[in-house]
Amino acid sequence: MPVIETRGLTKRYGRDAEPALTDLDLVVEPGEIFGFLGPNGAGKSTTIRLLLGFLHPTSGSATVLGQDIGSGSVEIRRRTGYLPGGIAFWDGLTGERLLDELAAMSGRPPIRRADLADRLEMPAATLRRTVRDYSRGMRQKLGIIQALQHDPELAILDEPSEGLDPLMQRAFYEILEELRAAGRTIFFSSHVLSEVERICDRVAIVRHGRLVALEDIASLLARRKRNVELRFDGAPPVLERLLGVSEVRVSGDRLTCRLEGDVAPFLRAIADTHVRDLTIEPARLEDAFLEYYADDLDAVPA
Amino acid sequence: MNLAYLAHLLRANRARIVVVAVALIIWGSLLPIVYDAFGEQFKDLFDSGLIPRQMMQFGGGDIFSLTGSVALGFIHPFAVALNLVFAVGFAGAAIAGERQRGTLEVMLARPISRRRVYATAAIAASLFVATTVAALTLGALVGAAITGRVDELGAGNLPVLWLNAVLLYGAFAAVALAASVSFDRLTPALGLTLAFVLVSYFFDALGSLWPDAQFLQDYSLFHYLDARADLTGLPVARDFGILAAVIVVAIAYALIVFPRRDLAAPS
């Protein structure tokens, strides 16, 4: 059974307003880290808030952990950990008291708190300080701990690495990978493509409230065009009609092109060329992301 | 109700409730003392006809009888303002304030329904209102005890006065909570409720001071706090009923509206 399943999920704020989310069909399977990508205002937070019952769908339906998002909202939140974007706390409390109170409201013991606090370098002395005195990064770490401390089946994280330094980001990614190994499901939104590329199994890309891509990271990257630069002696290789190769430009002893898909045909095509140097840039999710946005710019109504 | 959230609310407001309660005890005890010291002089002044009768009987209170001085203490702007710290200040901010700060989102990420959040805030508001009104009532008793006039006060009727005042401020708290669940920002929730309270107070004061405007008092919730009648053992059941009805209507509104609202991301 999918952990998250949406069918034609649509949200419109006000009768005459443009839809914030349109016909979202999405399936998130158990035990995967699912990245939800899009720029600000694309519909990421709207989707998350629909899943958690903060918003009511205009049309369509969705289930989370087998529960309908309308009638089963409380049960969904019982089994879910949520990190809101730009999280706010009761600043007058100490970090420890805050976590205690939130755990009490959750009705589940904070069995992972000590481990998370240790991994995210939030020692007891820090947790005994009032939240008012916390830096942005410390607040974010506190937010991550409150979302995961009761070991939820599903973690929904909105821009989770915002404010974390690179070391803490690494620690956070390790935590997510361990949760995945333990069978937990992570659904997180982000516009930090490098982190999505690094830890996600699958990604969905939304634009103007519409889903424009949904696939696993590996195949997304495999289909991306990589930049190739080749330096040669003698005659340049003939690449113009080679499958997957485009934008071939030759200038003196330097050839550049774009390469999509399997690299083997390309390597065979240059086998007879005296190659002095060859650089193939690895495919990056950022390129894929930008390309999707460029490609769909005309296809999707504004 | 969610006990953990209730404990959070009580803990977060404990210093404030102590300060307000102490201030109300002091205030409540002052007017019987003032009556004891100057009551006869005020009565002579009143009997001389120099001051219009209406001016000396504002809001059902006066200063030349013990029950009148206690009644005046309950309706005086100072006592009203202190009671409204929780009846309007706390209740108005209970949902809209959390929403504006972004903390409502953290709380609603727990397995707590919106109705349960509302019910918990309503119970906390009720406890605070019951405490502040009890402090004012206790102050009246203390003042009567200091002046040796407990028998004259009719202390057995104080619980009735307490209940009447709790219903009044409970009604304001219910209206404030209804406004609080309706807005994403604190300012409109508090502004709307304070406007309601001020208009209500103005109607009561105007109707009390100007006979031609007496009909306005029927539209003021303050009119339904009749401290003198409560203390003389003749409480008006209709007053209690009207205040209770306002509370029921405001609660019903909030319980319907809050769960149906969209809570978009805080801007």
Image (cartoon, helix red, strand yellow):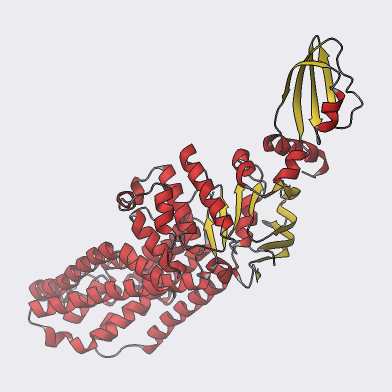
Give residue B92's quadrant in the image.
Answer: bottom left
Percent of width and height locating residue A68:
66, 70
How many marks do you count on the picture?
A: 0
Side of A190 relative to B9 (left or right):
right
Percent of width and height locating residue A259:
80, 29
Residue at screen point 28% across, 74% down = B131
Residue at screen point 42% across, 76% down = B215
Percent of width and height locating residue B107:
47, 62
| Image quarter of the C terminus of chain A | top right
Q: Please state which of residues B69 and B132 is positioned toward the viewer in this rendering.
A: B132
Q: Vertical placement of A85 versus B59: above or below? A: above
- The answer to whether residue B211 shows anywhere in this view is no
**In the current view of this chain or complex, which residue is farthest to the right?**
A241
Residue at screen point 13% across, 75% down = B143
Side of A137 relative to A256 (left or right):
left
Percent of width and height locating residue B241:
42, 85
